[in-house]
Image (cartoon, coloured by chain):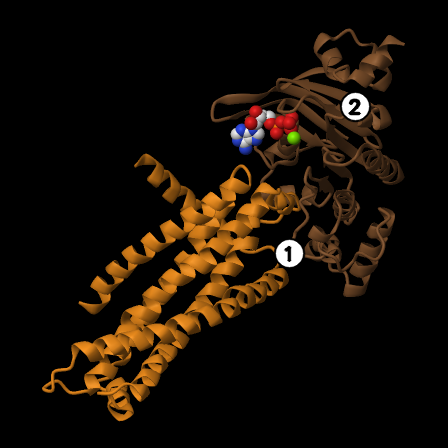
Amino acid sequence: MIDVKNINKSFNGKRILHDVSIGFKQGEINLVIGASGSGKSVLTKCIVGLHEVDSGSVEYDGRDFTQMNFKERKSIRKEIGMLFQGSALFDSLTVEENVKFPLEMYTKNSKEENLDRVNFCLKRVDLLNVNHLYPAELSGGMQKRVGIARAIALNPKYLFCDEPNSGLDPRTGIVIDNLIQEITKEYNITTIAVTHDMNSVMETGENISFIHQGKKWWDGNKEDILKTDNEELNEFVYSSKIMQKFRNI
Amino acid sequence: MLSIFHHIGKYFLLLGRVFKSPDNFKLIRKQIIHEMMSLGIGSLGLIAIISMFMGAVVTLQTASNLNNPLLPAYLIGYATRESFILEMAPTVMSLILAGKIGSNIASEIGTMRITEQIDALEIMGINSASYLIFPKIVAALVFIPIIVIYSMFLGAFGGFIVSMYSSGMTIESYVTGLRYDFRAFSIVYAMIKTVFFAFVITSIPSYHGYYTRGGALEIGKSSTKSVVYTSIVILIINYILTQLLLL
Ligand SMILES: Nc1ncnc2c1ncn2[C@@H]1O[C@H](COP(=O)(O)OP(=O)(O)O)[C@@H](O)[C@H]1O
Ligand SMILES: [Mg+2]
């Protein structure tokens, strides 16, 4: 469970996040949705500490992350996995080395134990026989899978996914969404997924927060979202023809 | 003007993070070896070709300017040696490496920045500045002095080949010149310069790469900028150190 309380963030005097407070629940996919440029990525990066917040707090199961120094944060960082928008695999390393990377950094496991764990994670995301390929040799969907495998290598308690299905065709996107959902349930992870894709929302949305111009505008679940009378949210949800049709029936 | 001070300040802050105690020695050692291979070995061919041709040309030019019978022929070998030890090998080769290694480093780290690979390192609690930049600096501090010495030998060798095939020069006089009035301090001076240059050649492009923002276009820009600034800083340091050490 992660509690974000009243965080504010500006860049060069431009306010990006305004007093955002959200509770993210364990064992669920917590979605953060909003238009491009609304501040979703900045919000995630503030939560994981890639950006420092100007004010407010972020609590990981009661531990206030914003007040910690680099060393103290490390203990929480070990419990965080993150899937980046562009996968962010290390392109000088093979698939196997990518997934092994956090293990070598943090565990004192033997080579064999690490390799077992790598193969387990790769199998979990349905990737077989790609251990020795480089990221550039994989399709976008496969890169995301490797990204997920790397993110879960250390058995994280918290999983962050920034636009997990951006750049993928709708079907592969849904496969990735479902994979994240399964993993979340299986290991009882607090998962936060950022998206602007309504497909994901309908597929996996349990606890949804809508960000509009850097403010938390609305929250609810995927049933509520279709019936809301919030004007900005409606505009976001029913922006595509297919959703408009869906509303009219 | 203000922005120059801003960059210099930011550069030294970054260096502060680079030299914070590294997280995992085993991984860092692996990186250092990897960097030595890719930065060092990868430059040997280019440096060999350039050094031999420059050694040959310097020898020919000196010979053509020294065709006064009153001047001893061994001065040709002597001039080649001195120009290589003092300037060609340390400074000119460093400028060439600034182009080759510098642009490589800036675009590699810049790509890692814009594709969020640096964020991925940070999220794992790794000091990305230290993990990425420290091994490059160490590798350069070890390898570039070796490259410079290698260039000195190849420069002299280029001149040697020319002396074999040119009229008005003999191998004997060239070799006598190479050995004439040799002072070990010249090598010390060259190595001191080289160590400074090696630091600059890796740290300035790392800085430009590390703070790249935007997309592919910006990677190209940081790479160009890093070569320009590295070259300027090399020339300035060269001037200052020469003033301090030789006079
Ligand atoms: N490091 C940064 N420096 C300055 N501005 C930034 C930075 N990162 C993001 N922004 C700005 O913050 C706003 C929100 O960006 P972002 O969170 O990436 O949007 P999205 O919701 O599409 O993920 C954008 O206007 C962007 O330009
Ligand atoms: Mg984003």
The label on residue A198 is: 2
Quarter containing ligand 2?
Answer: top right
The answer to whether residue A25 is seen in the rendering is: no
Provide the letter of the chain coloured brown: A
**What residue is drawn where x is 84% and y is 34%?**
A171
Q: Which chain is orange?
A: B
**Residue B44 vertical position relative to residue B136 in the rendered view, above or below:** below
Amino acid beneath label 2? Met
In space, the residues marked 2 and 1 are separated at their CA atoms by: 34 Å
Q: Residue at x 37, y 38 (%)?
A: B6
Relative side of B187 to B126, left or right? left
**Residue B153, visible in the rendered structure:** yes
Indicate whether B197 appears above or below A170. Answer: below
- Say which quadrant the C terminus of chain A sits in: top right
Q: Is residue A154 left or right of residue B42?
A: right
- Answer few, some or many: residues within 10 Å of disc 1's Cα (few below 14, many 20 plus, some between 14 and 19): few
Amino acid carrying label 1: it is: Ser
**Residue placed most toward the observer, A207 or A188:** A207
